[in-house]
Image: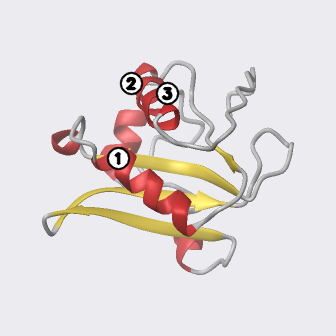
């Protein structure tokens, strides 16, 4: 989790005291409205995904991608897209995927990944909310 938070810090100003923590992390293993996923490739941990039922847009959703990370070595190898498709298959419904506008690599990944999906409707919601 710490490498992810450090990488993400390049795109946001942390409101915490600078510690490498994620306040909701433990809740993903204890609350039924949250699910953690570890991404594996050949037995090695390639990344993780954290999903929940909170709707960042306020429009309502079945699932939201709270956090998604693929370790640098595994990027651009199809692992992230395949993992998201499997997570989505296991958790059908309306999804929200909030992406920081400043995080250009994430924007590029999600544009390609979402375009590759069949039978989905994509609605872009721009927000000035920096949460």
User: How far apart in space, not on screen, are marks 2 and 3 (Cα)?
Assistant: 10 Å
Q: Residue at x 61, y 41 (%)?
A: 97
Q: Nearer the viewer, residue 17 or 1?
A: 1
Q: Nearer the viewer, residue 102 or 38?
A: 38
Q: Secondary structure at mark 2?
A: helix
The residue carrying mark 3 is: 111
Residue 80's disc number:
1
Q: Is residue 37 left or right of residue 95?
A: left
User: How far apart in space, not on screen, are marks 3 and 1 (Cα)?
Assistant: 12 Å
Find residue 103 and report its horizontal and vertical position in percent.
47, 24
Q: Is residue 128 left or right of residue 48?
A: right
The residue carrying mark 2 is: 105
User: How far apart in space, not on screen, are marks 2 and 1 (Cα)?
Assistant: 13 Å
Q: Nearer the viewer, residue 7 or 58?
A: 58
Disc on the earlier residue, 2 or 3: 2
Find residue 99 and report its horizontal and vertical position in percent.
57, 32
Figure quadrant of residue 47 = bottom left
Q: Is residue 35 above or below residue 53?
A: below
């Amino acid at each position: 989790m710490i490498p992810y938070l450090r990488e993400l810090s390049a795109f946001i100003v942390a409101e915490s005291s600078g510690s490498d923590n994620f306040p909701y992390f433990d809740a993903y293993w204890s609350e039924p409205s949250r699910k953690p996923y570890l991404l594996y490739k050949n037995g090695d941990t390639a990344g993780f995904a954290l999903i929940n039922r909170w709707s960042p847009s306020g429009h309502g959703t079945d699932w939201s991608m709270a956090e998604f990370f693929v370790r640098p070595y595994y990027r651009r190898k199809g692992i992230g897209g395949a993992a998201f498709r499997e997570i989505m298959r296991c958790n059908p419904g309306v999804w929200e995927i909030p992406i920081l506008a400043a995080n250009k690599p994430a924007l590029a990944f999600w544009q390609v990944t979402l375009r590759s999906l069949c039978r989905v409707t994509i609605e872009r919601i721009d927000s000035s909310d920096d949460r």
